[in-house]
Amino acid sequence: KVIFNGLNMDKYIKKTDLITNKKFLVTSHLRKEKGIQDLVEVVNEIHKNHTCNFTIDVYGNGNYESEIKKMIANYKIEHYFNFKGSVNNLNELYKNYDYLIHPSHAETFCYSVIESLICNVPVITTNGAGNILKQVDENKTGHLFNPKDKNKLYSILMTILNTKKDYDFSNFNANATTFDIQNMVNQYMKLLN
């Protein structure tokens, strides 16, 4: 029997409007397996070929951070990225963004995808790896691409930057109770009884 890790749903602040400000976030331990280098390369391609104004705030730190920052500096695309470090109030910040970008090559549980959806923020992530819990539905709660498929990520970002997409927030929390902390406790109690 699988009992999912529980999250305190009450502490997450939900996005309530569809106003876009072309702000993206990445929340991740900064290591190579998270695929952030793929995102950097895609942003560089967008920068070379288009005039687009957007920002990506990166929350987290890790041993690959210096490599990511070096890539960004070499491409001269620092104005797109803001490194915010680790913070303890992401539950209050998700609502300020249009999308979570999670280009992961491998995951186990992937809290950031679940947290983003709880907050009504659509997710751009990878099939299988980033969407390991299968909570992201194409065009309903976000967009999916295969790990390391930079062409598809490029296409997704260009579509988002050039068109306005309306989302039905009721789709975002359809399975949220699965990950509610009270549900986790109830399942453990049932198992123990």
Image (cartoon, rainbow, N blue to C red):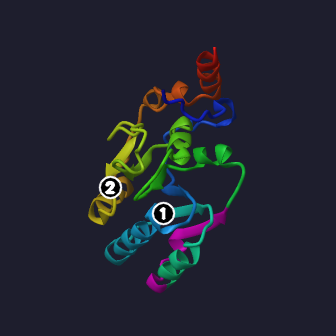
Give the residue furthest to the top.
193
Q: Answer left or right for 9 relative to 160.
A: right
Dot 2: within a 10 Å radius of its alpha carbon, few (fewer than 14), some, or many (20 or more) residues? Answer: some
Quadrant for the C terminus, please: top right
Q: Amino acid at mark 2?
A: Ile
Quadrant for residue 150, please give it: bottom left
Viewer-nearest residue: 187 or 140: 187
Q: Earlier in the sequence, mark 2 or mark 1?
A: 1
Disc 2: which residue: 156
| Residue range (magenta) | 74-85
- Picture layout, residue 140 above or below residue 89: above
Q: Secondary structure at mark 2?
A: helix
- Picture layout, residue 166 above or below residue 185: below
**Which x, y percent locates residue 102?**
46, 55
Q: Amino acid at mark 1?
A: Phe
* Residue ID at (49%, 78%): 72
Disc 1: which residue: 54
Q: Answer left or right for 83 relative to 80.
A: right
Q: Answer left or right for 168 relative to 79.
A: left
**Which x, y percent locates residue 22?**
48, 56
**Which x, y percent locates residue 121?**
50, 42
Which marked residue is nearer to the observer: mark 2 or mark 1?
A: 2
**Which x, y percent locates residue 133?**
43, 39
- Picture layout, residue 2 above or below residue 158: above
Viewer-nearest residue: 16 or 109: 109
Dot 1: within a 10 Å radius of its alpha carbon, few (fewer than 14), some, or many (20 or more) residues? Answer: some
